[in-house]
Image (cartoon, rainbow, N blue to C red):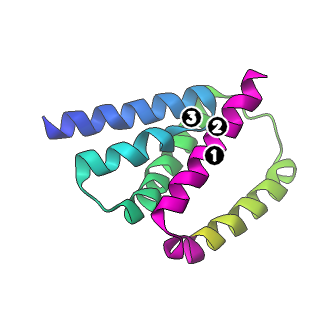
Amino acid sequence: MHKIILSLVGATAGLVNGLFGAGGGMVLVPLLGKRTGISEQERFPASIAIIAPICVVSLLFCYPFQLTFWQVFPYLLGSTLGGIAAGLWGKHIPVVWLHRALGALILWGGIRYLC
């Protein structure tokens, strides 16, 4: 039963990520703690490790990719550098700040899309 619940959580994250182009981590981060017992500090990197393949699957099956490599290269370069910085410094940021930052980002995005 436990594996079925985890699979349903993963399916929900995949559905959210595929429909909206992002956001699967919003499903995974809180549920990873409830279902796996991993620490709050470990949830964010675990979520990224799960979301990365979901993003590839979403890209391949949901959206026709119409951009060239050189059009997306600046984004790939910037996101790679941001990911490295987050990996190096993220573990030193208190979890409560990460939660607040994520909440603010979600709120800002929601308001932006509603207006």
> Where does the image place residue 59, in percent across and percent down from the top left?
62, 36
Find numbered disc 1 in the image and state the secondary structure of the residue it sits on: helix
Residue at image position (34%, 43%) is 31
State yes or no: discs 1 and 3 in contact (Cβ < 8 Å). Answer: no
Q: Which residue is mark 1?
A: 104
Nearer to us in this view, 87 or 68: 87
Residue ID at (33%, 48%): 32
Q: Which residue is mark 2?
A: 107
Task: Looking at the image, tell me whether mark 1 or mark 3 is earlier in sequence order.
Answer: 3
Q: Residue furthest right?
A: 71
Up-down relation of residue 82 to residue 14 (above or below): below
Judge left or right: residue 68 versus residue 10: right
- Badge count: 3
Q: Position of residue 115 (x, y in %)?
A: 79, 22
Image quarter of the N terminus: top left
Gap in Å between the C-alphas at discs 1 and 2? 5 Å
Disc 1 and disc 2 in contact, CB within 8 angstroms: yes
Q: Position of residue 61 (x, y in %)?
A: 57, 29
Magenta highlight range: 87-115
Q: Could you tell me the amino acid type at mark 2?
A: Leu
Question: What whole-number distance in Å separates the C-alpha atoms at marks 1 and 3?
Answer: 26 Å
Instruction: Give the residue pinned by disc 3.
Output: 58
